[in-house]
Image: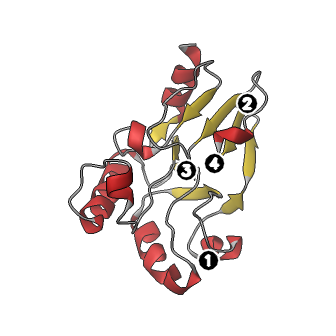
Amino acid sequence: MTIWFTADQHFRHENIIKYCDRPYDSVKVMDSALVQNFNRVVGMEDITYHLGDIAMDGPENKWKVKRIIDKLNGKHVLIYGNHDRMKPFHYVDMGFLHVHTYLHLPEYDLHLVHDPAMAQDRDKMWVCGHVHNVFKVSENGNIVNVGVDVWGYTPVSLEDVLAAFRKY
């Protein structure tokens, strides 16, 4: 089993293509590429921590988001993002194992949040999303952004996240 991290997929969000200058002609093409990239690296027994903003849909479109989640390999944990508009139990109904606003992985001493503004303790290693293509690793090296916009639209392995911290 491998551990993966990703954030800010914004499935079904047409405007994110222009906001983040994503290389896709349409939301359909983007969603398909994100699913393909995900499944190219994530295995069926792997676990992925989605650090927010998986899709902007509300509960009225829950089934549309679920169809996308069902295509993704492995098991999933959601760290709630500012654009995740459904209640936690909706995401659990879609197949997420857990939904959190913050999660500490003590075996790696990683702190998972969506927004890096929550990463106030500079002595801890924080993994975030939210900032899209603003940075990959923070200036002081204690925050790694796992957003798709800075990792080739593909999830990031635990090993690559830890290596990013070691560089600083």
Residue displayed at 53% across by 30% down: 161
Q: Would residue 127 be seen by someone viewing this image from the given angle? A: yes
Residue type, label 3: Ile
| Circle 3 or circle 4, nearest the eye | 4
Q: Estimate the spatial distance between the alpha carbons at disc 1 and disc 2, rounded to whole Å.
A: 29 Å
Looking at this view, name the residue that lies furthest to the front.
19
Secondary structure beneath dot 4 equals loop
Q: Estimate the spatial distance between the alpha carbons at disc 4 and disc 2, rounded to whole Å.
A: 17 Å
Residue type, label 4: His
Q: Estimate the spatial distance between the alpha carbons at disc 1 and disc 4, rounded to whole Å.
A: 21 Å
Dot 2 corresponds to which residue? 109
Q: Residues within 10 Å of mark 1 (few under 14, many from 20)?
A: few
For marks 1 and 4 on the same chain, the one whose residue lies earlier in the sequence: 1
Q: Position of residue 70 (x, y in %)?
A: 44, 70
Q: Would residue 1 be seen by someone viewing this image from the given angle? A: no
| Circle 3 or circle 1, nearest the eye | 1
Are discs 4 and 2 less than 8 Å apart at CB?
Answer: no
Judge whether 32 appears above or below 122 on screen: below
Judge whether 45 appears above or below 72 on screen: above
Secondary structure beneath dot 1 equals helix
- Asked whether, in this view, residue 162 is left or right of residue 72, the answer is right
Secondary structure beneath dot 3 equals strand
Q: Estimate the spatial distance between the alpha carbons at disc 2 and disc 3, rounded to whole Å.
A: 17 Å
Dot 4 corresponds to which residue? 114
- Asked whether, in this view, residue 75 is left or right of residue 10, the answer is right
Q: Nearer the viewer, residue 132 or 41?
A: 132
Q: Estimate the spatial distance between the alpha carbons at disc 3 and disc 1, rounded to whole Å.
A: 17 Å
Give the quarter of the image for residue 67. Answer: bottom left
Dot 1 corresponds to which residue? 93
Dot 3 corresponds to which residue? 47
Residue displayed at 68% across by 74% down: 87
Residue displayed at 48% across by 75% down: 66
